[in-house]
Image: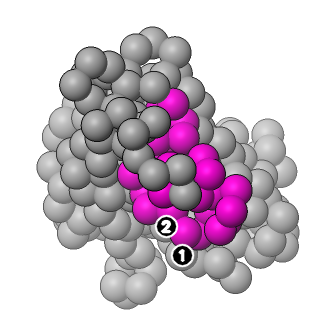
Amino acid sequence: MLLKDIPQDSRPREKLLARGPGALSNAELLALLIRTGLQGKNALQIGEELVQKFGGVAGLLHATPDEIKGIKGLGPAKTAELIAVLELARRALAEELKEKTLFATPQAVRDYLQLQLGSRPYEVFAVLFLDSQHRLIVLEEMFRGTLTQTSVYPREVVIRALALNAASVVLAHNHPSGTAKPSRADEALTQTLKSALALVDVRVLDHFVVTSTGAVSMAELGLL
């Protein structure tokens, strides 16, 4: 069925204008971005395919550009638009964290880290540098590794903390395996960084282990 064959009051654009965005399903919202389909598959059907393939909007937000490119019916322009929307979502979360005390919005921190690190196929070690009021200065990906390990150099973390005049940090790294449980190596690294940063009066507030489905706080587990 073509979109023009759908009753007018049920078409995504008309439905949004008449009833507001909350009335639309995830697939209908995506159809508005996709706009046109291809022979045998309209924009709404492509939107439904995206939702099913990635398990909902949260899964789509964690999708990599290569995964999105693999959807039949999404050419370079449409793929670029979807990737741009994902980036806007990441930036919106970053702006929220910069304007508010970080731990006033713990779920926003988890969502932000998932968007930034959750879908990476390789291990990334990142640091959220915070000011004296626990507001985000910047998140920096400091080290990259293989699927199993990352080499982290405490000296470089200390240098960046001093350069940014950070008062505290939140550490984060992803587990591409999908297992969010901190390892003994994670615990040892956290203590090493905590000791190194304490020498320059920078506190380690937390260390998150991130996967595509969640982010586990080592502080909440009593491991900090």
SS under mark 2: helix
Seen in the picture, residue 86 relative to 188 is either above or below; the reply is above
Residue shown at the point (41%, 75%) measured from the top left:
217
Considering depth in this image, is 202 or 13 the residue closer to the camera?
13
- Reading the image, the residue beneath label 2 is 110
Horizontal and vertical percent position of residue 116: 49, 46
Position of the C terminus by quadrant:
bottom left
Q: Which mark is residue 5?
A: none
- Reading the image, the residue beneath label 1 is 107
Residue that extends furthest to the top in the rendered view of this protein: 76
Horizontal and vertical percent position of residue 15: 58, 58
Please indicate whether residue 83 sits to the left or right of residue 181 in the image: right
Q: Is residue 166 magenta?
A: no
User: Range of the magenta residues?
Assistant: 10-35
- Residue type of the residue flagged with mark 2: Arg
Mark 2 and mark 1 in contact? Answer it, CB < 8 Å.
yes
Considering depth in this image, is 10 or 216 the residue closer to the camera?
10
Q: Main secondary structure of the magenta part?
A: helix
Please indicate whether residue 60 sits to the left or right of residue 11 in the image: left
Instruction: State the separation of the CA atoms marked 2 and 1.
Output: 5 Å
Horizontal and vertical percent position of residue 13: 60, 47
Say which quarter of the image contains residue 190: bottom left
Considering depth in this image, is 195 or 44 the residue closer to the camera?
44
